């Protein structure tokens, strides 16, 4: 559901996302589905914590989903749920998928190709909007942030019926990921240090805990068309503050039953504040 915002660049909108989506009482399908009133679910972003099992050969259990341990369901189980929701909702809004890397064991140099191959094999390349899809000017020698600032993000309407993946978590693994073959990567990668995003680099997503961000940093990042995700937005005060500061993605545990957890009483998107 996106109406007058179809022509709005992605960096100029704000939307609700679920935090630790696998651990919510609502299924992924329920979290993504618009209900009435509008604060009941209707998320346009989710998050999955992932673990790699590097002793195995590549298979559907190579990555699993859990918060604290490397057990848990296969990542492919959740990808199948997303694929099923996609099939049942043709022309749907773009869905933002955070993959929070919890692993820290094994060869980090193998991770970039492993996660990309896993997503294309068990989800489908045709469903994903990659950094190069969104920013064709990206090469292996230039900086994604420069391309984004010059071009801006595509419009909401142009992203429909697709998913965007973004890596979070283990900083060392993210660095290896975005520094190698950057124009061929499937995912974006976030950063929790605003200072690193104010200079040319290959990350264009700022990820910060509710209450920790500074307005001056938000203002600088908005000027550079960096997306801002705030997580643990679990109270009305935190929600209003994050929206007022200019966040794009509000990640919350409060997927349903909280009237304040909406960006608009009429739509699943709203205009970003502080434009």
Image (cartoon, grey):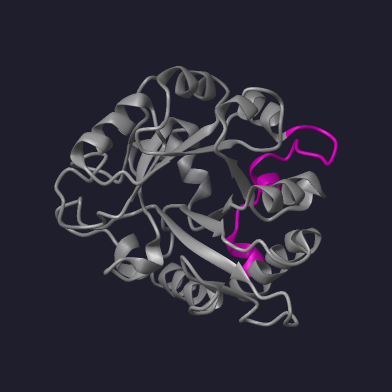
Q: Is residue 226 left or right of residue 234?
A: right
Q: Position of residue 127 (x, y in %)?
A: 58, 63
Any magenta on residue 135?
yes
Q: Position of residue 73 (x, y in %)?
A: 49, 79
How would you classify the magenta stretch by its main secondary structure?
Answer: loop
Number of numbered callouts drawn: 0
Q: Position of residue 114 (x, y in %)?
A: 73, 67
- Of residue 2 and residue 50, the one placed in the foreground of this image is 50
Residue sitting at x 76%, y 50%: 176
Looking at the image, can residue 89 be seen? no
Above or below, 219 against 132 in this view is above
Q: Is residue 95 left or right of residue 31?
A: right
Residue sitting at x 37%, y 37%: 14
Residue sitting at x 77%, y 52%: 184
- Of residue 210 and residue 159, the one placed in the foreground of this image is 210
Any magenta on residue 225?
no
Looking at the image, can residue 193 be seen? yes
Residue sitting at x 71%, y 46%: 132
- Of residue 131 and residue 207, the one placed in the foreground of this image is 207
What is the residue that sits farthest to the right in this orientation? 141
Above or below, 44 against 236 in this view is below
Above or below, 266 against 27 in this view is above
Quarter of the image with the C terminus in it:
top left
Q: Is residue 176 left or right of residue 234?
A: right
- Which of the 4 image quadrants contains residue 213? top left
Q: Position of residue 178 (x, y in %)?
A: 73, 46
- Of residue 136 and residue 172, the one placed in the foreground of this image is 172
Give, as a single range, the part of the protein colored magenta. 124-143
């Amino acid at each position: 559901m996106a109406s007058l915002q179809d022509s709005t660049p992605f960096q100029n909108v704000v939307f609700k996302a679920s935090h630790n989506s696998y651990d919510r009482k609502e299924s992924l399908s329920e979290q993504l589905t618009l209900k009435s009133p509008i604060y009941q679910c209707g998320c346009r972003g989710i998050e999955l914590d992932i673990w790699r099992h590097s002793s195995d050969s590549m298979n559907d259990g190579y990555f699993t989903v859990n918060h604290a341990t490397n057990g848990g369901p296969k990542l492919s189980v959740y990808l199948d749920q997303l694929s099923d929701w996609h099939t049942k909702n043709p022309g749907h809004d773009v869905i933002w998928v955070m993959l929070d890397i919890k692993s820290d064991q094994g060869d980090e140099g193998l991770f970039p190709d492993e996660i990309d191959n896993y997503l294309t094999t068990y989800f489908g390349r045709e469903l994903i909007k990659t950094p190069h899809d969104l920013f064709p000017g990206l090469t292996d020698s230039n900086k994604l942030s420069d391309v984004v600032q010059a071009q801006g993000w595509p419009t909401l309407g142009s992203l429909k019926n697709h998913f965007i993946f973004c890596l979070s978590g283990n900083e060392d693994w993210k660095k290896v990921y975005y520094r190698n073959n950057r124009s061929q990567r499937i995912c974006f990668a976030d950063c929790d240090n605003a200072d690193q995003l104010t200079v040319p680099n290959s990350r264009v997503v700022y990820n910060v805990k509710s209450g920790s961000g500074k307005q001056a940093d938000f203002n600088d990042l908005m000027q550079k068309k960096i997306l801002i995700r705030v997580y643990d937005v679990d109270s009305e005060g935190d929600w209003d503050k994050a929206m007022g500061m200019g966040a794009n993605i509000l990640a919350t545990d409060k997927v349903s039953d909280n009237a304040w957890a909406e960006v608009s009483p009429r739509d699943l998107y709203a205009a970003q504040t502080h434009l």
